[in-house]
Image: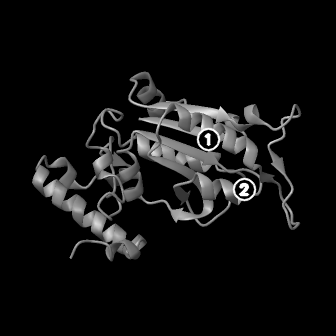
Amino acid sequence: MRIDIISAVPELLESPLNHSILKRAKEKKLIEIQVHSLRDYAINKHGQIDDTQYGGGAGMVLMCEPLSKIIEELKSQREYDEVIYMTPDGVQYKQDMANNLSLKNNLLIICGHYKGIDQRIRDLYVTLEISIGDYVLSGGELAAAIMVDSICRLIPGVLNDETSALTDSFQDHLLAPPLYTRPVSFKNLKVPEILLSGHFAKIEEWRFEQSLERTKTRRPDLIKKLPK
């Protein structure tokens, strides 16, 4: 998979995309992530990429010309399955969307900044608008990093144990069960005996029951999505 990200502040993406699981995935050549600075396509020598809003109002808006130039250039090099804009008014990001996007070959992500981007870029190029939650960030970079991480970890070979991603929260509309590791006893709290039994069928049954109970308590809205 290849992911191209357009950003007015590419430095914000350096750490999230170059460490831990994503770093190893890139080293294995399972994914390719390229971050492009919007300022390289500025309209003048001063590096201008934004301007004031028509109609007045606080906050600057990313201009059409720089975004159009870089999008056209990237699209001339490859065909994108989706051109994604990270925005608070987009479709709320869910695990099933991550699953679907992980099957794509090429993704282009546009990070808004300041007040956002000119609507005409959204009308002309964007095929999918995504929000990671009902709140506003200073820009789309952190949202993009979260989405990229959630997508890439699903690609076969990225995780050492490929079954790990299949047991994450939300994969089956349930939250993950409680997790335990060594030591068996810590500050008078002990690991449940069932997990030490070696009886894997009963362990899986216990984990499902715990997931179901945790979901009912913490996210009852998810229970409605379970198959009847």
Nearer the N terminus, badge 1 or badge 2? Answer: 1
Rounded to the nearest angstrom, the CA distance separating label 1 from label 2 is 16 Å
1 or 2: mark nearer the eye: 1
- Kindly identify which numbered label has been placed on residue 71: 1
Whether residue 15 is visible, yes or no, is no
Left/right of residue 83 with respect to residue 217 in the rendered view: right
Residue type at mark 1 is Ile
On screen, 225 above or below 110? below
Q: Are marks 1 and 2 in contact (CB under 8 Å)?
A: no
Q: How many marks?
A: 2
Left/right of residue 101 with respect to residue 143 in the rendered view: left
Residue 111 at x, y percent in the picture: 64, 47
Identify the coloring: one colour
Residue at the image point whose x is 74% and y is 31% from the top: 40
| Residue identified by numbered label 2 | 116
Badge 1: residue crowd in 10 Å (few <14, some 14–19, many ≥20):
many
On screen, 216 above or below 12? below
- Kindly identify which numbered label has been placed on residue 156: none
* Secondary element type, mark 1: helix
Residue at the image point whose x is 87% and y is 56% from the top: 52
* Secondary element type, mark 2: loop
Which quadrant holds residue 158? top left
Quarter holding the C terminus is bottom left
Q: Nearer the viewer, residue 69 or 187?
A: 69
Residue type at mark 2 is Gly
Badge 2: residue crowd in 10 Å (few <14, some 14–19, many ≥20):
many
Residue 185 at x, y percent in the picture: 33, 47
Residue 119 at x, y percent in the picture: 69, 60
On screen, 222 above or below 32? below
Which quadrant holds residue 24? top left
